[in-house]
Amino acid sequence: MVSAQYDREAFAIAVRRPGAREPIWIYLSNVYAECAGASRSERRERIDRLIRIMAEPHVDEAWESVRPKLRPVLRPVTFGQAGVTGVVPPISRAALPLLRELVVIDQPESMAYVGPSRLDAWGVTVDEVFDAARANLTQISDEWLRHDWPGDDALIRMIDTGDGYFTSLLLAPDWLAEVSRRAGKPVVAFVPDTNTVLLCDVAGGGLAALYEMVEKEYGEAIRGLSPVGYVAGPDGRVVPYAPVDHADRVAARRAEVLLAATEYGAQTQWLAKQYDQAGIDVYVGRLLAVARPGEPAVTVATWTDGITSLLPEAQYISFVGDGGPGPRVPWRVVAELVGLEPEPLLAPARYRVSAWPPPEVMAELRARAID
């Protein structure tokens, strides 16, 4: 018999199925957001689907039977970070800046994220799981590549109904490079949410308006992913698009800063709450964004003398002391002279600091400051 328990603080339901080692946690924030703007019939359909998922019996599949069902998925770096205390997060690895790759088991009406306990039961390694998921993704990418590129100035919108794993295609080796080859020009891909891919050639530039549209979709998405544009690099690997055109460069940098501010913002809120509950006296620094009209945005972290802080990684560090604002120094210079080291297990990365560096180091930092 399946049992379920509601956790008010986590706004989640713990579903316990006979034979399962651990409960399945179903977080309700996204479901609530989707139902809030839906019609009565749509809300009923979503709730009925949620109940069906909860009522599914536990199937303890062996590795050979579950391997064909594995799929890699892209998620924001803070995905699952604010879950129930003590619950082990799913396996993941870095994929793109501020995005991570996870693995799910594809099921008829849902997907189940793969956690460490599954690996123990299957008797396989993390690498074997990721390799199997990527191999299954190759079949999906090959099927998509059978379609011809529609022509010049094309804008393709791919909308996933739940089983297409379209945003995962950015993880398929050489997929975006092959799309560009068939288009005869570089193609930029946007993934504003977990179900949408936008493809557009970049040969003519003038993508500022497209970036603006993607930013709006990203901001309104219930399951937002990234406002950044991505292209195939020289080696075929997917990288953030770095335009040559000034207007496009400003728009592209704004998208990167927006993603960083969103992810660090979510992490700041979660960490501050955790430290407050644990009675840990540490300041979780905010990532600040600064933009002058017509110029690319930059990010700044503040190092306040004498306050133990966790700094987010930024382009610049602004030093603040009793006498007010001090120098603003490029991050790479501070990292070189001070030897900043990331705190373990935090993603996105943060760096613990307290008192300012010694006077002789501060003198060098002042000499290399931008203002």
Image (cartoon, grey):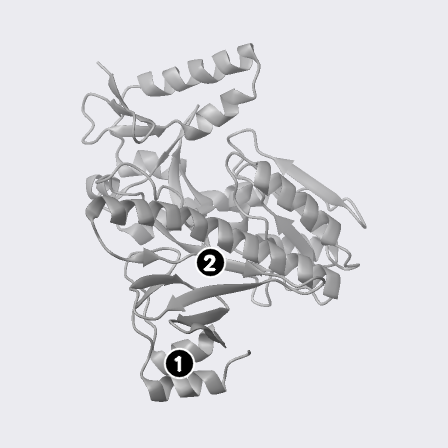
Q: Position of residue 5 (x, y in %)?
A: 25, 20
Residue at image coords 62%, 39%: 217
Q: In the picture shown, does residue 48 fall above or below 32?
A: above
What is the C-alpha distance between the residues marked 1 and 2?
Answer: 20 Å
- The residue lying furthest to the front in this view is 323
Q: In the image, 295: left or right of 68?
A: right
Residue 353 visible, this angle: yes
Q: Position of residue 295 (x, y in %)?
A: 68, 65
Q: In the picture shown, does residue 275 fall above or below 333?
A: above
Crowd tier of the residue under label 1, counting other residues whose Cα lies within 10 Å: few below 14, some 14–19, many 20 or above:
few
Residue at image coords 74%, 49%: 209
Name the mark on residue 88: none
Nearer to me, 170 or 191? 191
Nearer to me, 103 or 51? 51
Looking at the rendered structure, the kind of residue marked 2 is Leu
The residue wearing badge 1 is 336
Picture quadrant of residue 142? top right
Name the mark on residue 287: 2
